[in-house]
């Protein structure tokens, strides 16, 4: 969501449907973890987390300043002192989440859960796909994708951790593969159809963002989220708290962490049970009926008041 276009839409009285995630709401009750800022490694996670918690509200206020400035410049009311209010702005605000993953407080009027909105690229399958994915399997299959936002060194740490494990791996790099050390048990392509890969895999390792995690959970698969930015940490904290996955810090986790997590069956079995239960309760993805219900509740806005002089 970009605030510049939102201001234009408000001034033009164009109805605005905001598709976002519930964990960004000021009403969300999830854990707030410090992202992988450069200074986290210098201070260590415990100290960085304490500082983040102490100054988090100041940070939200700081980010709200330019949003309030541009809105008031054009005669629109400000959003207050929490920039997350701008992320909730919409005539209709739709949350692409399962409510059982991000337990909501009572939602204000105009806010609705509609479920995940799935997307998977249409790409040519690599030559090894049929044998690795649909062939007779004697070992678990791991699907690895850190997307375009995953740090390159984090991808290499995961690959190093997978080396020699009793598992087969299919990996999507979302970028050039040059320079990567690829173990013998890993097959790599630049892009893979994520939905089909999640359906085939026994375990999914992703960047912790909501699209990848819901793709895995929609197929009842346990997920390891290798998180870097704030969005990924908010999402994976919620996923971990309901027992559907494990959160790993992208810049501090070593290959040893993945060598320990990937073969461990106990936590993965528990995650499968939790995700299957929530899938039965919430459905796979955004339901047309939920979207229609959200839109039906919408009422056209009245004219936007202006503080500007004629």
Image (tube, rainbow, N blue to C red):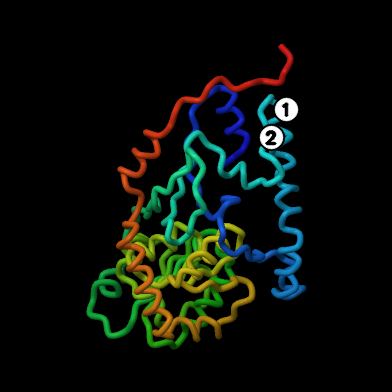
Q: Residue at x 62, y 37 (%)?
A: 3
Query: Is residue 162 or residue 206 the one in the foreground?
Result: 206
Q: Residue at x 50, y 86 (%)?
A: 260
Q: Position of residue 29 (x, y in %)?
A: 56, 59
Q: Is residue 214 visible?
A: yes
| Residue 130, image quadrant | bottom left
| SS under mark 2 | loop
Residue at point 66%, 46% (across, down): 83
Locate residue 261 relative to residue 119 in the image: left or right: right
Relative depth, front residue between 174 and 226: 226
x and y percentages locating residue 210 in the rendered image: 47, 58
Q: Which quadrant: the N terminus?
A: top right
**Which residue is denoted by mark 2 in the rendering?**
78
Residue count near mark 1 (Cα–Cα under 10 Å), binned few <14, some 14–19, many ≥20: few
Mark 1 sits on what residue? 73
Look at the picture and state if 166 lies above or below 206.
below
Q: Is residue 172 above or below residue 113?
A: below
Q: Residues within 10 Å of mark 2 (few under 14, many from 20)?
A: some
Position of 61 compared to 139: left or right? right
Of residue 238 and residue 135, the one placed in the foreground of this image is 238
Residue at (43, 87) in percent of width and height: 165
């Amino acid at each position: 969501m970009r605030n510049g276009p939102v201001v234009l839409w408000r001034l033009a009285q164009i109805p605005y449907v905001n598709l976002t995630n519930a964990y960004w709401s000021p009403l969300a009750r999830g854990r707030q973890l410090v992202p992988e800022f450069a200074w986290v490694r210098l201070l260590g996670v415990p100290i960085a987390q304490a500082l983040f918690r102490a100054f988090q509200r100041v940070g939200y206020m700081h980010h709200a300043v330019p949003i309030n400035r541009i809105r008031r410049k054009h005669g629109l009311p400000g959003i207050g002192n929490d920039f997350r209010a701008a992320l909730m702005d919409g005539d209709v605000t739709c949350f692409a989440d399962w409510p059982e993953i991000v337990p909501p407080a009572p939602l204000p009027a105009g806010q609705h859960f509609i479920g995940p909105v799935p997307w998977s690229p249409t790409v040519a399958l690599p030559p090894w796909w049929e044998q690795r994915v649909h062939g007779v399997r004697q070992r678990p299959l791991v699907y690895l994708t850190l997307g375009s936002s995953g740090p390159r060194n984090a991808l290499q740490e995961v690959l190093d951790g997978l080396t020699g494990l009793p598992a087969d791996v299919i990996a999507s790099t979302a970028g050039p593969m040059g320079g990567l050390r690829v173990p013998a048990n890993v097959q790599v392509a630049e892009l893979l159809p994520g939905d089909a890969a999640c359906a085939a895999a026994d375990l999914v390792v992703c960047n912790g963002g909501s699209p990848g995690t819901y793709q895995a959970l929609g197929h009842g698969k346990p997920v390891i989220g290798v998180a870097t930015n704030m969005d990924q940490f908010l999402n994976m904290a919620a996923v971990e708290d309901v027992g559907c996955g494990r959160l790993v810090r992208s810049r501090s986790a070593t290959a040893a962490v993945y060598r320990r997590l990937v073969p461990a069956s106990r936590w993965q079995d528990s995650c499968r049970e939790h995700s299957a239960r929530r899938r039965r309760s919430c459905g796979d993805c955004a339901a047309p009926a939920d979207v229609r219900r959200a839109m039906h509740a919408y009422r056209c806005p009245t004219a936007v008041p202006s503080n500007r002089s004629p």
